[in-house]
Image (cartoon, helix red, strand yellow):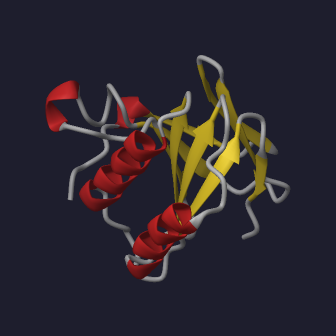
Amino acid sequence: MREIPAHCTTKTSNPLIVFSEKKSRIAFENPNHNSYLAIQVDGCVFSAADGPKCDKLLESEMYADQYFVELKGGDTMKAVEQLKETIEKLPPRQREAKRMAFAVFSNTCPKNDTKRQAIEKRFRNKGVCIKFCRTGDAFLLER
């Protein structure tokens, strides 16, 4: 397991945690003001030489839940590959931790077809729920 350098993380308990890059954006609603680590994965935890990786990771300090985020223009398969590779390189700190992946698209979100369902099933079989989102979507952090 790769250690996450402290300089790649920002601790936050804000009620709204936003990740954005270029034209893509996702918000995480944190109504309980729980403490999270917002982690810059691409270009900090991993370099270009480390291969595909997602952009961001939001990790709960209390529960070790992990929310992997790839902010993308429109390339679905590249986003899926980047998320998959990062998830494999950063295993959970606790066995019962929730793990989710978000592919956020600034252009069009992939339609719910058999190809997308197959991707969702592959992730689910590895204990990860993947969501395909449009830029500006928000996700409620429930714990």
Looking at the image, which residue is at 21% across and 26% down? 48
Q: Position of residue 110 (x, y in %)?
A: 61, 48
Placement of 83 over or under 120, stated as above or below:
above
Looking at the image, which residue is at 21% across and 51% down? 2
Specify whether 102 is left or right of 93.
right
Looking at the image, which residue is at 69% across and 38% down? 26
Specify whether 44 is left or right of 120.
left
Numbered marks: total: 0
Note whether residue 3 is visible. yes
Q: Position of residue 84 (x, y in %)?
A: 35, 56
Seen as rendered, the residue at the extreme front is 114
Depth order, front residue of 115/49:
115
Q: Quadrant of the N terminus?
A: bottom left
Seen as rendered, the residue at the extreme top is 22
Seen as rendered, the residue at the extreme right is 31
Placement of 71 over or under 128, stated as above or below:
above
Looking at the image, which residue is at 37% across and 76% down? 126
Specify whether 15 is left or right of 48.
right
Q: Position of residue 69 (x, y in %)?
A: 52, 45
Depth order, front residue of 140/122:
122
Specify whether 133 is left or right of 103.
right
Q: Quadrant of the C terminus?
A: bottom right
Q: Position of residue 128 (x, y in %)?
A: 47, 70
Note whether residue 64 is visible. no
Question: Image quarter for residue 137?
Answer: top right
